[in-house]
Amino acid sequence: MTHQFDRTALREYDIRGIVGKTLNTADAVAIGRGFATRVRRAGGTRVAVGYDGRTTSVALEEALVAGLTASGVDVVRVGMGPTPMLYYAEATLDVDGGIQITGSHNPAEYNGFKMVLQRRPFFGADIQDLARLAECGDWESGAGSVETVDIMDRYVERLMQGFAGGTYRIGWDAGNGAAGPVIEKLVKLLPGEHHLLFTDVDGDFPNHHPDPTEEKNLADLKA
């Protein structure tokens, strides 16, 4: 079996596109198979997988896990959360790589995949290699296992280390993104006064676009 990606989805630092147009679940399976092949050929066996709160993320995660396990890698599912939580999982769990399904700051119709392999970024030539493996069907085969690990509380404890020793007055705008539940847990442990906005996860982003670099998206936080 071979697979061809839409070339516009193969970015420098991630694989990203409009779901249903330039990115789909077949792509997710192929990403899983290719990444698992790279992991196994580097001597690894386990990959952590996380996803954000977009409406398409669960289906892409299921397809990704199917691809990873079909190429013989064991998957550790860490569930929904922000991308740094996946990076934390990859750095602290007994795994050989990690993949986060996320559309980052892009509009709701986008989604994508950010990857790390053996504690290093996976980008550029690595992403092009996934396309090459897919086009050739040069994938390992196997039957990997799947387990679920709830890492959010440990991640929040790690975040707390950076806040030790102070009292704060902070406004938090989660923008209905996957960081919302993390922020809710974090502020319960922090001293000071905290004002939370839009911490409920909603992949349609009903309050504002999830890009804090645009001034208009900060209006609610400033109000």
Image (cartoon, helix red, strand yellow):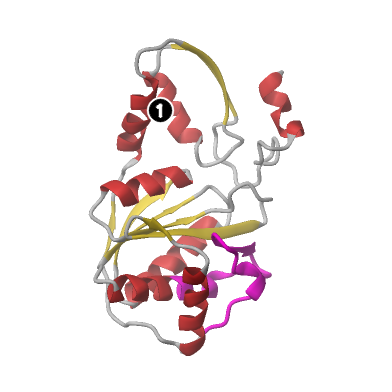
Residue 198: x and y in percent read: 60, 31
**Which residue position is annotated with label 1?**
185
Quarter in which the C terminus is drawn = top right
Callout 1: helix, strand or loop? helix
Q: Residue at x 64, y 75 (%)?
A: 7
- Name the kind of residue labelled 1 in the image: Lys
Q: Nearer the viewer, residue 136 or 80?
A: 136
The image position of residue 190, as x and y in percent, is 40, 17
Up the image or down, 141 lies above or below 207; here it is: below
Q: Based on the displayed image, in which of its 4 quarters is residue 167 positioned?
A: top left
The magenta segment: 3-31
Does the magenta-highlighted stretch encompass residue 98?
A: no
* 22 left or right of 70 in image: right
Instruction: Indicate whether 97 appears above or below 216.
Output: below
- Circle 1 Cα neighbour tier, 10 Å, few/some/many (<14 / 14–19 / ≥20): some
Reply above or below: 217 against 11: above
Q: From the viewer's perspective, is 73 left or right of 100?
A: left
Magenta segment includes 9: yes
Q: Nearer the viewer, residue 69 or 15?
A: 15
Q: Position of residue 173 (x, y in %)?
A: 59, 28
Q: Relative to residue 141, is residue 11 depicted above or below?
A: above
Q: Give left or right: position of 89 versus 178.
A: left
Label total for image: 1
Image spot of residue 121 (x, y percent): 43, 57
Farthest right residue in view? 216
Q: Residue at x 29, y 74 (%)?
A: 40
